[in-house]
Amino acid sequence: MTILRCPISPFDDQKPGTSGLRRPTRVFSAPGYLESFLQAIFEADPPPPGAALVVGGDGRYFADKAAETTARMALANGYARVIIGRGGLMSTPAVSALIRRRGAWGGVILSASHNAGGVDGDFGVKYNTASGGPASQDLGDAIHRRTLALTEYRTLSGPAVDLDRIGEQDLGAGTIEIVDPTTDYLATLEPLFDFPAIAALLKGGFRFRFDAMNAVTGPYAHALFEDRLGAPPGTVMRGRPLPDFGGEPPDPHLDHLAALAAEMFGPEPVDLAAASDGDGDRNMILGPGLVVSPGDSLAVIAANARLLPAFEGGGSFGVARSMPTSRALDRVAEALGLDFHETPTGWKWFSSLLDAGTIRLCGEESFGTGSDHIREKDGLWAVLCWLNILAARGTSVGELLGDHWARFGRDYYQRCDFEGLDADVAGRLMADLGALSASEADALCPDLTVGSIDSLAYRDPVNGASATDQGIRLSVGDRGRITYRLSGTGSAGAALRVYLEQYAGPGEALHHDPRQVLAPLLAAAQTIAGIPARTGLSGPTAIS
Ligand code: VG1
Ligand code: CO
């Protein structure tokens, strides 16, 4: 074993986005590219003596090779121990849980999350720090600065690492430990829920389905729902991680959940269905004939949190949502007297609030929900919340939602994506929107009144970190809202996200089709921003 110093030329495109760095697999697997980003991480957040690093991936093409590269480079850069999930697999929430349980210094997650995988898909790297949460904006900036100046990376020579052999392998400079990726994670979840009640539900005729989308949650879902909670075999669909996820993006969207959607919208739906994404941090909840909007899911969990052992008793707890997420949570917070916070998009902004105990529950419109048990959004945790709440209330998904809307009102919600845009066109569109006054925007759309327009900015109440230009928000018509934002998770070009919301109070018509309710807002949003003329797109390329 020797430490090797390998020369590289600096890369100028390694600025992390909303959640880590994502690039086409062919770019990430080119000589030196992954190594540059990892070296910058290890230099920007140097490990103290004796430190451990957790490494996991979502099973996508190149993740196993990248796990070994990460392990060798970590040991060559001063880590004493690298803990890797068997086969290089570990979900994002499980990495966060393991960092915390093992007191590790950090974690490297080899995933581009919901982006397509495979040699022609995307690859990505997320870095999490000792709290278990994603690297802060400042640390991301420091990592980026290092990538611009690196001239070499450090790695370790020596025999191949066996990623499939549970136990320790001594590499001289330090130890590699291969662990079962599910054990610590399930041990983290169990005390938070009433497992006996959920097991009784699942064994008592309640029918449940989980679609792992051929991604990392498969082994976790088999172990949790079938082995531990007694759901019948076959409950977990597409439970084996595949390098290309079976050819579809592991994105919990109905377009990519054909079999599950056919079942849930067909003649014999099960009582509850759920899906997760590539790295296991997102969740989609479905009932018979319906998809629960993520903003509603978060609000329902908050309103029923006292039914969960993790939240029963104790004092009041704080909650948070990202800015473009629906205001359904705000209504619950106000009615129940919960401290409420609004953050920019991306889980890194919740972490400091969770660390300080300012909040215990939070979520995003992009199918991400989580709590203070770890510092990441957690797909299976959210599914357990729903199972536990349904078991405790003895009700159906439809009834639970109906009761919720009757009490708090309903926030109709949709996210419309305009993908595949030229980055300059998208940048100019946002800049022009930012320069628009409310009266100018109002004049552009004769059918609806624009009350106000502002650019989203944020200052973290705990550590003072700040962010500007997080999106542009318009209040429209009677209790409607339009938010525009550019995606920060793509690997090329740009995607514009347009978030639409319309509130209907308790007692008002609550069971309309969101597409119909939000159609006037979509038309206004496209007109105000001049989307068709600027992009050539006559409508969204994806709606969720
Ligand atoms: C998207 C979502 C955001 C989420 C991020 C990472 O970011 O909108 O809410 O935190 O993905 O999720 P953007 O910048 O493309 O809108 V994951 O599961 O892809 O790590
Ligand atoms: Co994800």
Image (spheres, rainbow, N blue to C red):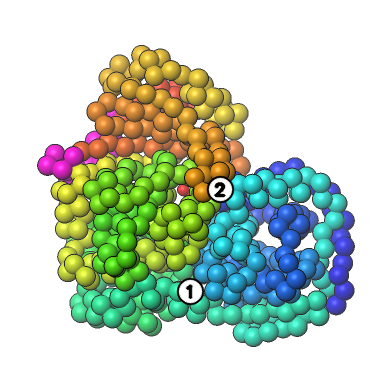
Residue 285, quarter of the rendered image: bottom left
The residue at the point 31 percent across, 30 percent down is 521
User: Counting other residues with Cα less than 10 Å from the Cα at mark 1, is it few (<14), some (14-19), or many (20 or more)?
Assistant: many
Given residues 9 and 442, the one toward you in this image is: 442
**Position of residue 269 measured from the top left corner of the image (x, y, whole percent):** 23, 64
**Position of residue 96 measured from the top left corner of the image (x, y, whole percent):** 54, 66
What's the residue type where badge 2 is placed? Asn
Q: Is residue 310 visible?
A: yes
The residue at the point 37 percent across, 32 percent down is 482
Magenta stretch bounds = 505-520
Task: Report whether 3 appears left or right of 416.
Answer: right
Q: Is residue 252 visible?
A: no
Badge nearest the viewer, 1 or 2: 2
Q: CA distance from mark 1 to mark 2?
A: 29 Å
Residue 95, quarter of the rendered image: bottom right
Pointer 1 residue: 185
Instruction: Say whether disc 1 or disc 2 marks the residue closer to the N-terminus.
Output: 1
**Position of residue 66 measured from the top left corner of the image (x, y, whole percent):** 68, 65
Given residues 405 and 292, the one toward you in this image is: 405
Q: For residue 515: magenta?
A: yes
Q: Residue furthest left?
A: 507
**Position of residue 449 measured from the top left corner of the image (x, y, whole percent):** 29, 20
User: Counting other residues with Cα less than 10 Å from the Cα at mark 2, is it few (<14), some (14-19), or many (20 or more)?
Assistant: few
Secondary element at tag 2 = loop
Task: Report whether 210 appears left or right of 307.
Answer: right
Task: Report whether 7 appears left or right of 241.
Answer: right
Residue 463 bears which disc, if any? 2
Q: For residue 277: magenta?
A: no
